[in-house]
Amino acid sequence: MNNVIRVLLAVPTMHRILIYGFGPYQHYASNITEVTLRDMKLPRNTFKRVFDVRFDRQMFENVFETVQPDVILGLGQHPRARKLRIERRSHNRGRSTQTRFATLSLPQTSETTVAYDAGDYVCNYSMWVGIEWCMRNNARYGFLHVPKDYSPKKLARYVSRAITSC
């Protein structure tokens, strides 16, 4: 019986992972994050959501509360990026001296760069809200900005690798 207990204790628990992206915005007819998430096959413990591009705290928090993830990975389209940008810091809109840092370590490759300015649009706002939710709920948070013309297949491979590293 003791061996059975040891084996059960050795089995890792699977993290609940939420990956989100955004729909089209401004003059962009599509969003690389929506296209990629729509076609991705994910493990059963992983959930995906595509948000409208709007400053709506409740929209984000409702999904976080429903899914109750241990890990949240946000994806956002970046119009000028040349590489995948691992965003490390978010700032409070209107109060740029208030910052929060991502707590999820994402894989660094030749296709990535680390950045400390998530901008001043909905991606940054979602980071702010997501990091705050994770702080209250003992979860980890990461955000990746994706070049608008990036390959959805390459992004899917990177996201799969990130999920595996969680």
Image: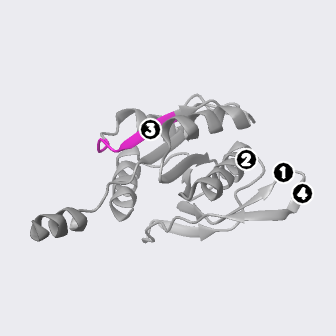
* First along the sequence among labels 1 and 3: 3
Q: Going 55% across and 45% down the picture, which residue do you hit?
A: 148
Residue 43 on the magenta span: yes
Marks 2/1: CA–CA distance = 7 Å
Q: Which residue is mark 1?
A: 93
Q: Is residue 157 above or below residue 152?
A: below
Tag 4: Cα neighbours inside 10 Å, few (<14), some, or many (≥20)? few
Q: Going 64% across and 58% down the picture, which residue do you hit?
A: 135
Q: Nearer the viewer, residue 115 or 96?
A: 96
Q: Which residue is mark 3?
A: 48
* First along the sequence among labels 3 and 2: 3
Q: Amino acid at mark 3?
A: Lys
Furthest residue in direction right, as rendered: 94
Marks 3/4: CA–CA distance = 30 Å
Secondary element type, mark 3: strand
Q: Which residue is mark 2?
A: 125
Marks 1/3: CA–CA distance = 26 Å
* First along the sequence among labels 2 and 1: 1
